[in-house]
Image: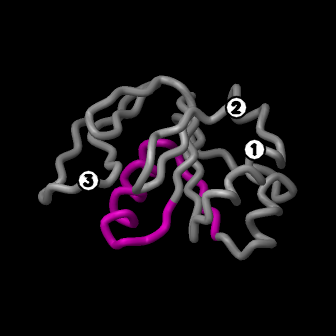
Amino acid sequence: MKLHVDTATALNTFTAYGPGYVEVNRLRYEHPVLVAPEGEVAAWDVEGFDSLTPAHFEALLARAPEIVLLGTGERQRFPHPRLTAALAQARIGVDVMDTRAACRTYNILMLEGRRVLVALLMR
């Protein structure tokens, strides 16, 4: 599905997504990524949902988000609370959804000026 933004922006915006990929500012990614409104799109060093560890979420603290969106691939899967405990202790909200919904939600929050960080798994 192609997504279109009404206003021009220098912020990272999801411009498309589909099975096994997302596009940010028209650049395609087929591996897990971390995306914030500003800065580079970063590879997220995780094999998949079943390999998530607390360290994967603790590493997100350095980016100082106010909310983290976790896109869990083609279907919504909830991580055990012990995995996201560091974010909860830092009073950072975590919302879990499938990757497509995470892309759409990110675009809305980013345009509202929120300090959102999305962590995406592709499958």
Q: Do the residues labelled 1 and 3 touch (CB within 8 Å)?
A: no
Q: How crowded is mark 2: few (under 14 residues within 10 Å), some or many (20 or more)?
A: some
The quadrant holding residue 62 is: bottom right
Q: Position of residue 100 (x, y in %)?
A: 42, 43
Residue shown at 62% from the left, 35% from the top: 44
Task: Determine the residue located farthest toward the bottom in the rendered image.
Answer: 91
Residue shown at 36% from the left, 26% from the top: 28
Marked residue nearer the N-terminal end (2 or 1): 2
Q: What is the three-letter code of the residue carrying label 2?
A: Val
Closer to us: 20 or 44? 44
* Disc number placed over residue 56 in the picture, else none: 1
- Which quadrant: the C terminus? top right
Magenta residues span 93-116
Residue shown at 79% from the left, 32% from the top: 51
Q: Where is residue 71 in the image (x, y as percent from the top left)?
A: 55, 45
Q: Distance between the residues labelled 1 and 3?
A: 28 Å
Marked residue nearer the N-terminal end (1 or 3): 3
Q: Where is residue 5 in the image (x, y as percent from the top left)?
A: 18, 53
Q: Mark 3 points at which residue?
A: 10
Q: Are marks 2 and 1 in contact (CB under 8 Å)?
A: yes
* Disc number placed over residue 90 in the picture, else none: none
Q: Name the residue under label 2.
A: 46
Q: In this view, does 27 lie above or below 37?
A: above
Inspect the magenta stretch and tell me whether residue 61 lies in it. Answer: no
* SS at circle 3: loop
